[in-house]
Amino acid sequence: MRGYFIGIVVIIISLLVLVLSIHTLTSKETQTNTNSIQWGNDINQAMEEAKKSNKTIFIDFYADWCSYCGEMDEETYTDPQVKEKLTQNYVLLKVDVDENPDLSSKYKAYSLPTIVIVDSSGNEMKRIIGYQTPEQLLSQI
């Protein structure tokens, strides 16, 4: 009988630990999502906004299957200095190459991740290819 109660106590403690772990993970995900950069996905809208704000357009070409693209989302674009510089100086556009093959071809985004900085008319000013750490990206933008 005593072993039965010990077993129940162990199960209850295990469930409590599991629930607390899930809650902690969920809280961190929510916090990360709230601190993320707001990306546009329409090139025409980005060009209009760039003309009005006198900014250039920062286009991040990516794909869901690209592991380095995901790393940049998780590590580079979450860096406070990167976020500040991007949001202050650029109109931000994120383009999925699988969903937008025409735009990807226009800017020759064949290797991922590819970042293309364009003026408000869509003319390329700078190209950055491959994974960038926060420090590497900051030195180029």
Image (spheres, rainbow, N blue to C red):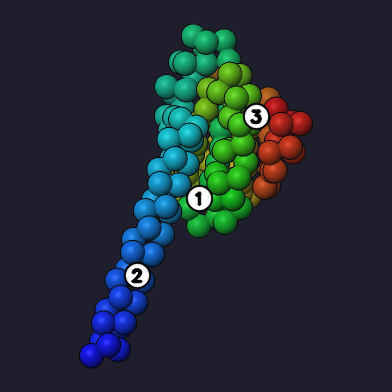
Mark 3 or mark 2, which is nearer to you? 2
Check disc 3 and give the amino acid type: Gln
64 to the left or right of 5: right
Mark 2 or mark 1, which is nearer to you? 2
Q: Position of residue 104 (x, y in %)?
A: 53, 41
Q: Which mark is residue 63?
A: 1
Q: Nearer the viewer, residue 123 or 85?
A: 85
Mark 3 or mark 1, which is nearer to you? 3
> Residue at image x 69%, y 43%?
132
Check disc 2 and give the amino acid type: Ile
Q: Secondary structure at mark 3?
A: helix
| Gap between marks 3 and 1 measured at Cα | 24 Å
Which residue in the structure is indicated by mark 3? 81
Q: What is the quadrant of residue 22 in the picture?
A: bottom left
Q: Cβ–Cβ below 8 Å for labels 2 and 1? A: no
Which residue in the structure is indicated by mark 2? 13
Q: Nearer the viewer, residue 34 or 11?
A: 11
